[in-house]
């Protein structure tokens, strides 16, 4: 790990990752051993590794898998669900499975076509549905915290994209911990300081079987482009990604983000249908999308 000037053998690396995770959980006051945690799993290396680490650290943690119905080409959803279930079964863990099509009558690609969002790429609809469903399940099943497997590469790419486009409100909102607020679950990202390759190494060394393929719609996405740009920077200057992200968190904590003074946060109110916070007038974007999908089905 060039950024830490540290080289570890397998055994020490497998101890180092949970130790560091525990340190981040405490540093950012994410959760305690008394709280019930729901980890969102996608069958990928990050989320399954996060689940594995939290179990090894002795936390009370169950999994949530959202079946998106993305089965073009590589059967992405079937395979990612199979691997999530396999991990849960092998470790005697509880996995909640929510099938978007069974819940709402349409899968993610179908909802995307109906709602005319994203120009053939369902990511906008997918992100909206994932956020909504994760909040709903965490709240309805009484979990204190929702944990996701975002790693440093994910977080740095989001920050980079938002900075390039100077999206001040999004920049201010980015954090390893989002406190709960009207109808929205508390969200935490315990892996946010680990490089993606550290998580890949962890999953492989722990023998976790995960889905290697990306979702077919990830190809050519903005976030992959930003990750590649940051990787070039990292190759030339080891640690650049980590410094970019950590210095941002530090500046934010000490109130030194100069944009802060100029940004007016949008007014939020509870959606009259699902109760989750929204800035859109009347229904939240998710409930509006489902209403539109239902109206379209009635016409067909
Ligand atoms: Fe959803 Fe897009 Fe991610 Fe695929 S790449 S899982 S469609 S957000
Ligand atoms: Zn709603």
Image (cartoon, rainbow, N blue to C red):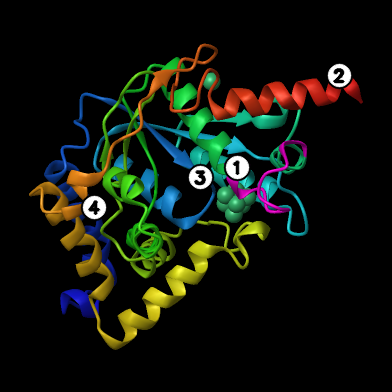
Image side of residue 194 versus residue 111, left or right: left
Q: Which residue is mark 1?
A: 126
Instruction: Determine which residue is flagged by label 3.
Output: 87
According to the picture, the residue beneath numbered tag 4 turns out to be 18
Relative image position of residue 155 (x, y in whole percent): 35, 57
Give coordinates of residue 274: x percent, y percent: 52, 16
SS category of the residue bearing label 1? helix
**Closest to the observer, 197 or 286:** 286
Dot 3 falls on a residue whose secondary structure is: helix
Which numbered circle lies on residue 298? Answer: 2
Q: Are marks 2 and 4 in contact (CB under 8 Å)?
A: no
167 sits left or right of 41 in the view: left
* Vertical arrangement, residue 271 with respect to residue 89, above or below: above
Instruction: Indicate yes or no whether the magenta region holds residue 120.
Output: yes
Q: Is mark 1 within 8 Å of ligand 1?
A: yes
Q: CA distance from mark 3 to mark 1?
A: 24 Å
Element at badge 4?
helix
Q: Which class describes the residues within 10 Å of circle 3: few (<14), some (14-19), or many (20+)?
A: many
Name which residue lies at 24% across and 62% down: 245
Q: Which residues are magenta?
A: 114-126
Distance in Å between CA atoms under marks 2 and 3: 40 Å
């Amino acid at each position: 790990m060039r950024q830490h000037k540290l080289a570890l053998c397998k055994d020490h690396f497998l101890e180092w990752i949970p130790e560091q995770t525990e340190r981040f959980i405490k540093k950012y006051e994410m959760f305690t051993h008394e709280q019930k945690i729901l980890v969102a799993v996608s069958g990928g290396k990050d989320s399954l590794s996060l689940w594995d680490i939290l179990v090894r650290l002795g936390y009370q943690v169950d999994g949530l898998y959202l079946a998106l119905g993305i089965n073009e080409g590589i059967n992405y959803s079937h395979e990612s669900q199979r691997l999530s279930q396999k991990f849960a079964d092998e470790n005697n863990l509880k996995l909640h499975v929510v099938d978007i099509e069974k819940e709402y009558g349409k899968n993610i690609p179908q909802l995307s076509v109906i709602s005319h969002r994203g120009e053939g790429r369902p990511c906008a609809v997918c992100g909206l549905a994932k956020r909504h469903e994760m909040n709903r399940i965490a709240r309805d099943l009484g979990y204190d915290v929702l944990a996701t497997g975002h790693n440093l590469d994910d977080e740095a790419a989001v920050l980079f994209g938002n900075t390039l486009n100077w999206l001040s409100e999004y920049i201010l909102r980015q954090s390893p911990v989002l406190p709960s607020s009207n109808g929205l679950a508390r969200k935490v990202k315990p892996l946010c300081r680990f490089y993606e390759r550290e998580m890949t190494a962890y999953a492989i060394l722990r023998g976790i079987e995960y889905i290697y393929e990306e979702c077919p719609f990830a190809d050519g996405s903005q976030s992959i482009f930003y990750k590649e740009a940051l990787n070039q920077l990292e190759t030339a200057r080891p640690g650049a990604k980590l410094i970019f992200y950590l210095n941002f968190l530090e500046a934010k904590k000490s109130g030194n983000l100069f944009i802060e003074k100029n940004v007016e946060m949008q007014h939020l109110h509870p959606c009259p249908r699902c109760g989750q916070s929204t800035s859109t007038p009347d229904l939240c974007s998710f409930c509006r999308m489902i209403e539109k999908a239902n109206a379209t089905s009635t016409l067909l």
